[in-house]
Every structure is written in structure tokens, then in C-alpha cells.
């Protein structure tokens, strides 16, 4: 009678002994399950915790669902209030004004604090809310960068003069959890961009105009997208220059990239590990059943039922699954808390939601049991099909004496030494073992190359952006319209080699069906400090007449080279400038943001702007100039409102991607573990299956070293055969993975270095060679007399 899923007491004893005899492969399978379950638990729980933290911040601060900038804000607000699903509507002042903190100038933004209704509120971290007059709250990143506290002062450039405001506290905002100026400048240094929250009256005084932004919050059951679509025609009719939803809000969009990354990671990588564990368990069980055919026949002859035998071998897979899943669940819960607190601390979220999600360990355990159980089902069914009479006859391989397929495919195989022909034949004697080893290699390369290609892509695109496209050392913003005298003053500074004028203005690009808010940048047609990577269209770039736009707008606005597009400037309360129709002459590749470009010569003739709309300049230093000294000299110029350094932005991006680099490095290590586990298991099985052959060769006088060499050669050849599909699949998967992260904010051109492929393949071959050591050592311990007696019997 079957007393449990593991059979009778005798079978349970046999199972324990089997596990003890094969503890190496068993522990390798359990470790792979552990890593898969732990990775799932850590990433899935971190994903849930981060999502919950964001949601609580957004709900507690009543963050808007739709932002509408420019035009007749009162008319837009009135119309929005009548749309079905809209819960709250508010207006406020938002103005981009330069700031000066302790003598250091930087681009800034002044945001009016909410009145009634309270939409887009801020979380007070330290200090008090402004009481009125010239009081302000410093956004968390700005306060941390300049160590601002209550009583400190910040100067705001308003109407061409610096006005002083007093900091009363430090606040966090749902709009700036990730510091971003807009969707084009998605990564901003705290030293290059700061936000002040001020009472609405003070905001109007500093900005020089009334409310210029409408905030719309929808009800809990309303459709945000439907409300936004209903608002678009109303906003456009009222002269609005931009409308975006919470999904498109710059800070939230950047954070959602991470959230989506966590959600993908929570299933993709654990699936790879559990698949590898299942393969290893399947290979090991299939080998045991093959070697225990006579034992299975004896058990069946003595009355053991098929179900009893099947449950016995199924138990091996389930024990391996449980053995790895239980510690994996614990490890995953612990890692999830560390990941959540570390990431939340990096973002300085005002609310941290770390909680236990009961479904996480249940799903992890289910994944492991399914992987282990499915892996064991096939071998277990094979065991139940063994008939006592057939088992006693032994196993005679078919097709003996014929040339194997590898021999027929390899040129001049007849001239190869006998030992090499033996290697080729051995590969097809057990196609299952060969296929499993090759599949393990493919899985390992998949994980390694996907991870490593992410590093190559990020590094390559950032190098292209900052070394090949941007040749400037500083970007200057003037306090007002730049003049020739302002440019000459910069040229006269010691250490400045090149100065090029630049105009940057907010603009909305519109077609009949959609629109996109961006920054229009005008540069000299012969600029040397900015190289535009034209991927489609007129290769002359700025020398041609028309508009160059970011490549992402091909899909976002359904554009083609030669199409005409409406350009609308403005964003203040006074309403937009007239619409200008411009021809799109090409698309440019950029890593960060999606901008529009034209030449300064075309601005007046093509776009209808003033003849000299210079807002800043690009600077290049003389060789050997000290960047810190140059920054002080430039900021001392009275015409300069702010200075930004591309090098400082690159360092920030390196810091930001440091988290990703750490994760990818972990994936590389895990990929090596995965490859070692699968190869170690299949090699161990391979050696175990050949005990009779090895004993016969040893008895015939063949040296042990020679036998080990043949086995090593076969396993390395099989590994090499798995390399080609592994590299192809790994590169394609890496390309697909990076495509999911490509948006109008981040546009990564897929890059994978040849040395990455070579290093990955080389590392895997080393892993394959090292993984054989335990199995080859076991050859020395074979009891030749026992094996030969059993074979003779």
C-alpha cells in the first residue's frame, strides 16, 4: 500500500540514500531553485513595496492626474470642472527662474503652493510651511545639495533683478521624487536645477504673471486616459501649449521605468533559474532510472505498483524543489526589505511602505514545486513503464557500428584518431544528455549576455552622448536676451577657447492628431560644439533649412521627412505666440530626451522669432584649464544667470546607473552559477552513466588520464556546440530587453561589444572545465571488480 507520495518506508529509505549518494548534483539543483525563488521574492516584493510607497505618496499629497500649461487657464479650469469624472481642479503659477545660493547660480523653478482645493501638495520634512511675504520651502534635493535650513536665504532672478526669499523648511513633492526639469531633461543635478515652493501671491510676483497651469485630479473610479482625451480639444481651443497625464509626468515616468524593470525582473530571471533547475533534475532522474532498470523490474516483480514506483522517483524532484524553495523564500523576503529601503532612501521618499505580501512566498513555492514536479514527471512515468521481464534483459543500444551524424558532418572524420571518433560517437549515444548540456549553455549565455549587453548599451550610449555629440565644457544661461557684448565678455575670459551662441525656448510640436512639448534649440549652422547624429533625412543637419527633431517623434507624432508640423511657442499666462508651420528635414538620435533643432539663421526667417533670441551659449575651455576655476569666472559675469557642466551630468548618470550596474553584476554572477549548475549536473550524470565503460577501459589497460581526457573533450565539444545558439539568442534577447526601456525620455541604441561575447564564451568554457573536476575525481574511486561482476551477471 502506498503510505505517502514518497512510497513505502523502504522506498523512503532508498530515496534518502539516493540523495546522499548524489548529494553534489542534488545540492546544485537545490541551489538553483534557491536562487530562482530568492530572486523572485526579492524583486517581486521590492516591486510591490515601491509601487505601494509611490501610491501612498501620490494619494497623501493629492497629486494631479492631468497637467495643462499655458493658454487661458481660467477658461480651461472652468471647462475641466464640467467633465464627467473630474474630482478637483486647481490653478497655480509655475515659472522657470534662475536661482543663486551662496553665490552659486543655477537654473531653477518657482512653484506656487496649493490653496483650495489642495492639489499637488508637498510633504513637509523639516521646518514650517511659509507664513507669507518672502518665505519659501526648498525642495528636498535643493536643500540637501546646499545644506539649506530654516532661516537661510535663496535669491531668485525676477524681472532682471535678484530677489531674496527666506527658507522656512524642507519639503518633498510627488512631482520631483526623481529630479527632472522636463521630459527632455530627465536627469538633473541638484547643483544644476532647484525648486522652490512659495505662496501663490509671491509666485505671481516673481513670475510676473498670473496662474499659467491647470491641475486636474480625477475620481477614484474615473478613467484617467478618457478624461485627458476629453480635455485635449478644450485645452487646445483655449491656447494651451502642453497637456500631459500622470503617466507622462517626467518624474513619475522615470520612476515607472524602474517599476517596470522590477516587474519584468520578478518573472524573467527566476524563470531562467527554475528552468535550469528543472533540466538538471530531469537529467539526473532519467539517468537514475536508466541505471536502476533491473532494480525497478525487481520491485515490480515483487508487487510494487506503478503508482508506488512513480511516486518514488517523483519524490526526488519535489524534495529538491522544497529543499531550495524554503531557504529561498526566507532569503528573498530579507533581500526585498534591503532593496526597498535602499531604493527608497536613494529617492528620499517621504513615505516607505515595507510590508509582508503573503502571495509572494506562495507563488515562489508554487514556482519551485511546479519546476521540480514537471521535471520529475517524465522520468517517473518512464519508470512506471518498465516491465519486469524487459528490465532483466538489459539494454542494448541500436545502430551499433554505423557512423554517427557528427562523424558524417565533420570533414575528414575517417582520418581522425580513434579517440576523437569515439568522442563524436559518444555525443549521439545519449542525445538527451547532449541536448540538456547544450540547453544549459544557451540558458547561461542568455542570462550573461542580456546582463552584459545592458552595461555595454548604457556605457556606449553615454559615451556617444557626452564624447561624440557634446563637445562643450559648459552651458551658460543669460539673465536676459543675450547680446554680442555678453558673448564677447565670455570670449575674453582666461581659459575660454570657444563661445557659440544658443537659443532655447519651450515649444510644442503639433500635428492634426497629436502634439508633443519639447525644447527648441537653435545653434549656429557651423557649430563645432554640438554634433547632431542625423539618422534619417538631410545629412547637412543645421546647414539645411528646416527643423530637425528627435527620432522618437517618428512614432509619437507619426512623422516622416518632408512633413510639415506646427510649432507653438510660449507657456506663460499671456498665451502662446502664433503658430508657425515648419518642414521636418530629418531625425536625430539622442540618448536623453527628445529635442527639436534649427539654425540661428533660420529662427527669424523660418520660425518668426526675434532676430537675436539668444538665451545662452556653449563654451569650450582651453586645454589644461581647471573646470572649477572656470566655473567661478563664468558665474562672476553679471550677464550669466546659470552655468551647467556636461561632465557633472555625466558623473550623476554614472551614479544613477551604479544601482543598475550592481544588479547586472549580480546577474552575471548568477548566470555563472546557473551555467556551472547545469553543466556540473549533466557532467556528473555523464560520468555516472559511463561507469561500466570506464571500468572496461580501465581493465583493458587504458590510463585513467586518457579516459578523463576523452570525457573532458566530449563535454567541451558539446559546450561549444551550445555556444552558437546561446550567443544568437542572448544577443536577440538583450536587444529586445533594451527596446522595452526605449522611450522619448531614454533612447538607447543597442550595443554589445565583441569582447563581451568573447569573454562570456571564454568564461563559460572555463566553468564547463572546472565543473568536471568533482566528477572526474570520482573515477579514481570506482570499484572495478564490483562493476565488472555486475556487468558479467
Image (cartoon, grey):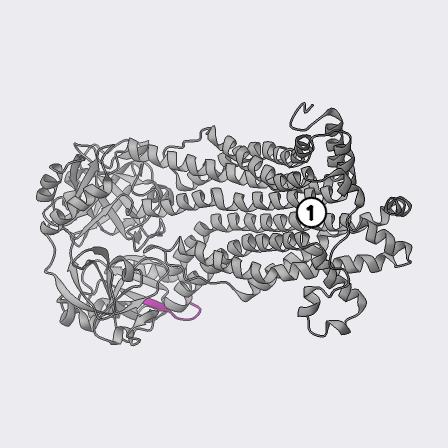
Q: Is residue 329 above or below residue 253?
A: above
Q: Position of residue 598 (x, y in %)?
A: 23, 69
Which of the pair 608/417 is nearer the observer?
417
Lateral position of residue 675 relative to residue 304, left or right: left
| Residue 649: image location, x then y, percent | 39, 56
Q: Nearer the viewer, residue 203 or 752?
A: 752
- At x 87%, y 44%, the residue is 790
Q: Quarter-wise, where is residue 10 in the image?
A: top right
Residue 465 position within the rendered picture, expressed as x and y whole percent measured from the top left: 39, 63
728 or 662: nearer the viewer: 728
- Res 417 quadrant in image: bottom right
- Crowd around label 1: few <14 · some 14–19 · many ≥20 (10 Å): many
Asked whether residue 773 appears in the rendered view, the answer is: yes
81 displayed left or right of 504: left
x and y percentages locating residue 139 in the rendered image: 31, 41
The residue under the point 14% across, 70% down is: 604
**Residue lying at 77% horizontally and 74% vertically, measured from the top left:** 415
Provide the secondary structure element on which disc 1 rests.
helix
Instruction: Answer whether residue 65 is visible to the viewer in this image.
Output: no
Displayed quadrant of residue 527: bottom left
**Does 623 lie within the magenta span?**
yes
Query: Which residue does the numbered mark 1 point to in the structure image?
Result: 681
Which quadrant holds the C terminus? top right
354 left or right of 764 in image: left
Amino acid at each position: 500500500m502506498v503510505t505517502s507520495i514518497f512510497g513505502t518506508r523502504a522506498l523512503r529509505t532508498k530515496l534518502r540514500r539516493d540523495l546522499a549518494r548524489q548529494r553534489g548534483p542534488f545540492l546544485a539543483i537545490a541551489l538553483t531553485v534557491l536562487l530562482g525563488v530568492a530572486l523572485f521574492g526579492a524583486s517581486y516584493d521590492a516591486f510591490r513595496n515601491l509601487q505601494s510607497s509611490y501610491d501612498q505618496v501620490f494619494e497623501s499629497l493629492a497629486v494631479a492626474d492631468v497637467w495643462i500649461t499655458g493658454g487661458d487657464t481660467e477658461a480651461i479650469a472652468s471647462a475641466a470642472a464640467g467633465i464627467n469624472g473630474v474630482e478637483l481642479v486647481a490653478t497655480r503659477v509655475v515659472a522657470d527662474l534662475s536661482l543663486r545660493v551662496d553665490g552659486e547660480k543655477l537654473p531653477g523653478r518657482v512653484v506656487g503652493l496649493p490653496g483650495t482645493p489642495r492639489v499637488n501638495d508637498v510633504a513637509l520634512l523639516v521646518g514650517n510651511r511659509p507664513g507669507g511675504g518672502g518665505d519659501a520651502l526648498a525642495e528636498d534635493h535643493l536643500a540637501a545639495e546646499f545644506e539649506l535650513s530654516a532661516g537661510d536665504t535663496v535669491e531668485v532672478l525676477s524681472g532682471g533683478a535678484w530677489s531674496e526669499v527666506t527658507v522656512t523648511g524642507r519639503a518633498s513633492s510627488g512631482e520631483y521624487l526623481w529630479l527632472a526639469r522636463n521630459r527632455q531633461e530627465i536627469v538633473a543635478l541638484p547643483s544644476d536645477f532647484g525648486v522652490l515652493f512659495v505662496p501663490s501671491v509671491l509666485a505671481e510676483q516673481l513670475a510676473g504673471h498670473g496662474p499659467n497651469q491647470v491641475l486636474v485630479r480625477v475620481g477614484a473610479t474615473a478613467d484617467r486616459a478618457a478624461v485627458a482625451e476629453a480635455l485635449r480639444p478644450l485645452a487646445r481651443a483655449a491656447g494651451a501649449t502642453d497637456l500631459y497625464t500622470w503617466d507622462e509626468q517626467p518624474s513619475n515616468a522615470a520612476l515607472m521605468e524602474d517599476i517596470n524593470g522590477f516587474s519584468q525582473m520578478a518573472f524573467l530571471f527566476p524563470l531562467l533559474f527554475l528552468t535550469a533547475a528543472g533540466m538538471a533534475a530531469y537529467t539526473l532522474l532519467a539517468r537514475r532510472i536508466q541505471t536502476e532498470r533491473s532494480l525497478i523490474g525487481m520491485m515490480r516483480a515483487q508487487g510494487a505498483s506503478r503508482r508506488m514506483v512513480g511516486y518514488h522517483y517523483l519524490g526526488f524532484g519535489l524534495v529538491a524543489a522544497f529543499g531550495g524553495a524554503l531557504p529561498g523564500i526566507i532569503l528573498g523576503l530579507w533581500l526585498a526589505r534591503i532593496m526597498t529601503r535602499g531604493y527608497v532612501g536613494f529617492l528620499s521618499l517621504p513615505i516607505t511602505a515595507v510590508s509582508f505580501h503573503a502571495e509572494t512566498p506562495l507563488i515562489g513555492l508554487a514556482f519551485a514545486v511546479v519546476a521540480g514536479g514537471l521535471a520529475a514527471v517524465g522520468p517517473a512515468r518512464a519508470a512506471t513503464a518498465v516491465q519486469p521481464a524487459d528490465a532483466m534483459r538489459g539494454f542494448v543500444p541500436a545502430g551499433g557500428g554505423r557512423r554517427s551524424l557528427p562523424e558524417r558532418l565533420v570533414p575528414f572524420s575517417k582520418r581522425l584518431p580513434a579517440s576523437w571518433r569515439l568522442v563524436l560517437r559518444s555525443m549521439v549515444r545519449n542525445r538527451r544528455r547532449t541536448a540538456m548540456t547544450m540547453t544549459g549553455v544557451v540558458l547561461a549565455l542568455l542570462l550573461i549576455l542580456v546582463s552584459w549587453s545592458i552595461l555595454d548599451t548604457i556605457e556606449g550610449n553615454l559615451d556617444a552622448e557626452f564624447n561624440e555629440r557634446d563637445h562643450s565644457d559648459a552651458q551658460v544661461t543669460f539673465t536676459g536676451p543675450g547680446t554680442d557684448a555678453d558673448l564677447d565678455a565670455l570670449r575674453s575670459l582666461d581659459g575660454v577657447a570657444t563661445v557659440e551662441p544658443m537659443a532655447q525656448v519651450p515649444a510644442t510640436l503639433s500635428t492634426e492628431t497629436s502634439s508633443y512639448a519639447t525644447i527648441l534649440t537653435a545653434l549656429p549652422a557651423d557649430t563645432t560644439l554640438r554634433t547632431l547624429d542625423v539618422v534619417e533625412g538631410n545629412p547637412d543637419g543645421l546647414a539645411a533649412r528646416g527643423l530637425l527633431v528627435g527620432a522618437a517623434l517618428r512614432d509619437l507624432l507619426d512623422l516622416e521627412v518632408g512633413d510639415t508640423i506646427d510649432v507653438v511657442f510660449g507657456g506663460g499666462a499671456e498665451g502662446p505666440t502664433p503658430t508657425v508651420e515648419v518642414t521636418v528635414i530629418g531625425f536625430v538620435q539622442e540618448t536623453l530626451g527628445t529635442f527639436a533643432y534649427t539654425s540661428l539663421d533660420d529662427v527669424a526667417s523660418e520660425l518668426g522669432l526675434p532676430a537675436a533670441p539668444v538665451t545662452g551659449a556653449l563654451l569650450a575651455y582651453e586645454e589644461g584649464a581647471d573646470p572649477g576655476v572656470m566655473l567661478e569666472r563664468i558665474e562672476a559675469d553679471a550677464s550669466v544667470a546659470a552655468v551647467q557642466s556636461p561632465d557633472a551630468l555625466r558623473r550623476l548618470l554614472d551614479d544613477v546607473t551604479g544601482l543598475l550596474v550592481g544588479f547586472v553584476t549580480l546577474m552575471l554572477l548568477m548566470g555563472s552559477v546557473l551555467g556551472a549548475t547545469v553543466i556540473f549536473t549533466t557532467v556528473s550524470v555523464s560520468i555516472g552513466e559511463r561507469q561500466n565503460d570506464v571500468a572496461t577501459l580501465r581493465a583493458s589497460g587504458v590510463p585513467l588520464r586518457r579516459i578523463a581526457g576523452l570525457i573532458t573533450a566530449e563535454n567541451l565539444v558539446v559546450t561549444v556546440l551550445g555556444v552558437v545558439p546561446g550567443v544568437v539568442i542572448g544577443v536577440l534577447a538583450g536587444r529586445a530587453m533594451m527596446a522595452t526601456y526605449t522611450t522619448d525620455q531614454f533612447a538607447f541604441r543597442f550595443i554589445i561589444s565583441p569582447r563581451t561575447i568573447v569573454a562570456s564564451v571564454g568564461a563559460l568554457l572555463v566553468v564547463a572545465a572546472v565543473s568536471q573536476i568533482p566528477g572526474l575525481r570520482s573515477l579514481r574511486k570506482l570499484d572495478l571488480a564490483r562493476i565488472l561482476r555486475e556487468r558479467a551477471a
